[in-house]
Amino acid sequence: MILSYFDDSSDPRHEHYFASGGLMAEESQWKNFHVPWAVATIDLKEPFRSSDCECQQKQFSSWSKEDCNKLMDRLVGVICEQRLHGYASIVPIDEYRSVFPDSGEYDAYYLSVKHTIINMAEIGHGERERYGFGGMKCWFEHSETTSGPTRTIYHQLRSVDTWEQAKSLDSNIYFRDKNLHPLQAADLVAREAFKHFLNQGKRNTRIPLRRMSDLLNFIVWRRPQLEYLRDNGGPDNLELLTSWGRDHRPHPPQFETYWRNY
């Protein structure tokens, strides 16, 4: 069984990007992850949050920038040493609202959630095809605002009759708080995905991202993909999303990615 853990990342006013990002690995790899992560964060009074560490705020307000960087360096090292693979789906909020002018505050995020779950199902399906058993379990950080709709999305996707990959998804989706160490690591990856596309063309690629680059697959929606989605049924058309790029439809525009040192 593959276990995957995801968190969201955005700017405070939800003006630029929403990212759904995190990490996946086989159960045996996750077993080897918990101890080194716990050791690295043993001095923290609260669960690790990447933005707080980088910005020296909340529990990091008395930390020096050097100490914050050292902690981030150790945590990225844990991810690299355990060979945990990262994934993120990123949606530009302004472009989404331009293409879908009647959208709600979190609708761009829910598109990234759908995209994330679909890709996890594809990976889980490959596992079942290879070994004849297994699949994918998904955890998301609990949120009073988004957990309910995310749960609904998950079970709607599992019910798409035309999508064989749905069978690889576990019967339940799981929500926990940041006390769960893999969700702290997911927070780090989601923020790196958000920051990468926010900074694109303005700043050099961030050091944590460069170190993890051979483990990451980030996919960003742009206007061509959003307009294709709009013109072929919209973001609620799960049959479209789960058959994206198949031969029976006009071929969609290619996604922009960050993948393996791209």
Image: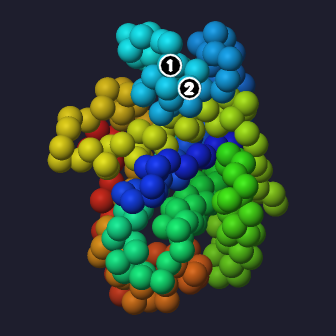
Secondary structure under the numbered disc 1 in the rendered image: loop
According to the picture, the residue beneath numbered tag 2 turns out to be 58
Q: Are marks 1 and 2 in contact (CB under 8 Å)?
A: yes
Query: For the point 59% across and 46% down, which residue is it?
Result: 7
Q: Where residue 1 sits in the image (x, y, percent)?
A: 73, 44
Query: For the point 42% across and 82% down, which residue is it?
Result: 101
**Amino acid identity at mark 1:** Ser
Query: For the point 64% across and 37% down, which residue is it?
Result: 183
Relative vertical location of residue 50 with respect to residue 16 in this rendering, above or below: above
Q: Judge whether residue 95 can be spotted in this image.
A: yes
Q: Where residue 246 sits in the image (x, y, percent)?
A: 45, 79
**Amino acid identity at mark 2:** Lys
- Identify the image quadrant of residue 236: bottom right
Mark drawn on residue 61: 1
Badge 2, how many Cα within 10 Å: few under 14, some, many 20+? few
Q: Say which of 15 and 151 sits in front.
A: 15
Secondary structure under the numbered disc 2 in the rendered image: helix
The colour mode here is rainbow
Left or right, 230 with reference to 153: left
